[in-house]
Amino acid sequence: MKIYLLTDFGSTYTKVTAIDVEYGTIVAFGKAFTTIEDDVTIGYNNALSQIYQQLGQFVLAASLACSSAAGGLKMVSSGLVPDLTAKASRLAAASAGAKVMKTYSYELTEFEIEEIEAINPDIVLLSGGIDGGNKAVILHNASIIAKVAGEFFVIVAGNRSAATQAREILEAGGKKVVVCENVMPAFGKLNIMPAKAAIRDLFIANIITAKGLDKAAAMMDMEIIPTPLAVFEACELLSNGTKAEKGLGELMAYDLGGATTDVYSMADGMPKVPNSFISGINEPFAKRSVEGDLGMRYSLTAMYDLIVEEDGGASFCTAGGFAMGAVQSWLEICRNDPSVMPHNEYAKYADIDASFAAYAIRVGASRHVGRTQKIYTPNGEMLSQEGKDLTQVRYVIGSGGAVINAQNPLNIMKEAIYSPRDLNDLKPLAPKILLDERNCLAAMGLLARREPDMALRIMKDSFVEIG
Amino acid sequence: MDANVIVNDENQEKISIVLGVIGADVHAVGNKILNYVFTKAGFNVVNLGVMASQQEFVEAAVEADAKAIVVSSLYGHGEIDCKGLREKCDEAGLAGIKLYAGGNLVVGKQDFTQVEKTFKDMGFDRVYPPGSDPQINVGHMREDFGLMI
């Protein structure tokens, strides 16, 4: 039998999925602890040995891999106006599969030097000013970034009249710099593909090695890409389809992880109701957002802080029917052991864990989708829409351990649907909810690079409709 | 040669201006004419089109490093729509940016000297009555920016 091996080097586990080339089905799965500190290939070989146990001998068609190990691709982005170039820089970084830790706007301050040092990014994306526009802020920010200690790359994707000077400032500070096209060359016009390509190239050429993945990379038939990028490409394929087979059309996907909640939408997002108009930038058809404060383990404290900030946690506890004390105990348990599951002795915390998951989906959705605001004009009531209208999206896909292992995944995933509680959020009104039960989105994104038809078929076959 | 840099006598970069029809006003024709005239006159025009909010004017001016904001309004609600624009500019670090307003700025047929005073009190530098020739505004801008083109 001929096999594709698809490997996902995760922060905790290395997962290998084996696909039978002839039948186009998932035939084996192996999972072992990621061993990035010593030698990443140890964990890889452990996972691989499970595949051999299940399949015996096989012929390898190709081995492809993605990685979010060693913190993934950590980025900081900056722009000028929050809703314009800062937002464009964040969209560019997120669509390249980065974990966007923070997005800054306007002038960076000395105080933020320490903050960026603490984030310890792999890449800083510096933008600001449309072409021929504001230069002062990007140049100021270049001088601040130049002072930030740490080994990282800087991509300059701002006002091109300022690009050369920004590069000189950064290089004088000892930074490695890549200059590419402006993320917003003209007012309101997004141009995120060049920055996305620059991020991908840096990841492949430098960051893989820096993260200790070069030995694994040498064993693969294709460069290792960031895991969220693989998921992104799987979602694009599932939505668009191939020449031979239709896709699902407009969809959203959620990947709820230990550190982040990733939200994807493949939809044009144009206004769906009469009398509405778009204000702000037109967001791209394929959009990813990543929420670093909504994670089920490493970022659970940050999520807890959000919940407490809202109303002291009252509505969270009331809705779930548990006490604040129990929530805090679970938080403590997760803090001490991020690999803990709400099973066995911890089974009593399963409801709390599910409530956290539901909260992450709800807030992740709210931040991803657009919203409307009523405006009263002499011509009557109008709706000003900011961001994407995703109300007509027909499929919502749930992925990630906290969703697929939950007792009732539907309870968690229905937070992705429109609710009068968040009145102005343009979430899908009546989507079908699919569950990525085999957690194969990333693997299918990899397979899509070689066998798009096969990857599409596997996704369609393995996703289960739960609501 | 950088395409964003036009060569004129002083070999300076083009001056950016932000243009748009403010509020809920959808009158597009004048906007298109102004865009044409200002572009022809050598300005880098960031045109917001119709139904532009104060915030959009301010944010566009920040990103574009604009030297002027040109606001049109035809539907009579210009006074309400323009109130506070100068203060927003000051807040956004656009101190000293030139603000121009023109069109049918107020309800009914009011005395233009009064209208002009109202708008100047709100922080506008120049105010234009209905039917003004855009070239007059071009001349004023050149004067205000010290351009000899």
Image (spheres, coloured by chain):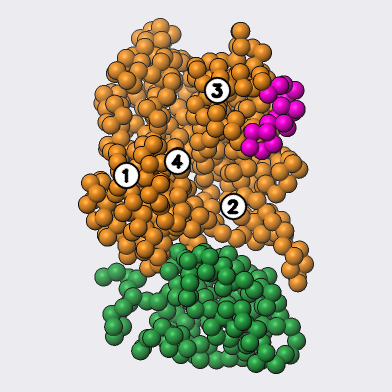
Chain colours: A orange, B green
> Which corner quadrant of the image does residue B51 belong to?
bottom right
For the residues marked 1 and 2, what is the alpha-carbon distance in whole angstroms?
33 Å
Q: Horizontal and vertical percent for residue A424?
A: 70, 49
Q: Label 2 belongs to which residue?
A: A387
Question: Residue under mark 1: which chain is it in?
Answer: A
Residue at 30% of width from left, 47% of height from top?
A: A147
Q: Horizontal and vertical percent for residue B92?
A: 51, 64
Question: Which residue type carries mark 3?
Answer: Gly
Q: Label 4 belongs to which residue?
A: A100
> Which corner quadrant of the image does residue A165 belong to?
bottom left
Q: Horizontal and vertical percent for residue A313?
A: 68, 31
Among the two numbered marks 3 and 2 on one chain, the one whose residue lies closer to the N terminus: 2
Which-is-in-front pick, marks 1 and 2? Answer: 1
Question: Which residue type carries mark 2?
Answer: Gly
Whether marks 4 and 3 lie on the same chain: yes
Q: Is residue A416 visible?
A: no
Q: Secondary structure at mark 4?
A: strand
Question: Residue under mark 4: which chain is it in?
Answer: A
Q: Which residues are magenta?
A: A308-324
Above or below, B149 relative to B3? below
Q: Secondary structure at mark 1?
A: loop
For the residues marked 1 and 3, what is the alpha-carbon distance in whole angstroms?
36 Å
Q: Label 1 belongs to which residue?
A: A148
For the residues marked 3 and 2, what is the alpha-carbon distance in whole angstroms?
29 Å
Above or below, A37 relative to A232? above
Question: Which residue type carries mark 1?
Answer: Val
Which-is-in-front pick, marks 4 and 2? Answer: 4
Q: Label 3 belongs to which residue?
A: A401
For the residues marked 4 and 3, what is the alpha-carbon distance in whole angstroms?
21 Å
Question: Which residue type carries mark 4?
Answer: Val
Q: Secondary structure at mark 3?
A: helix
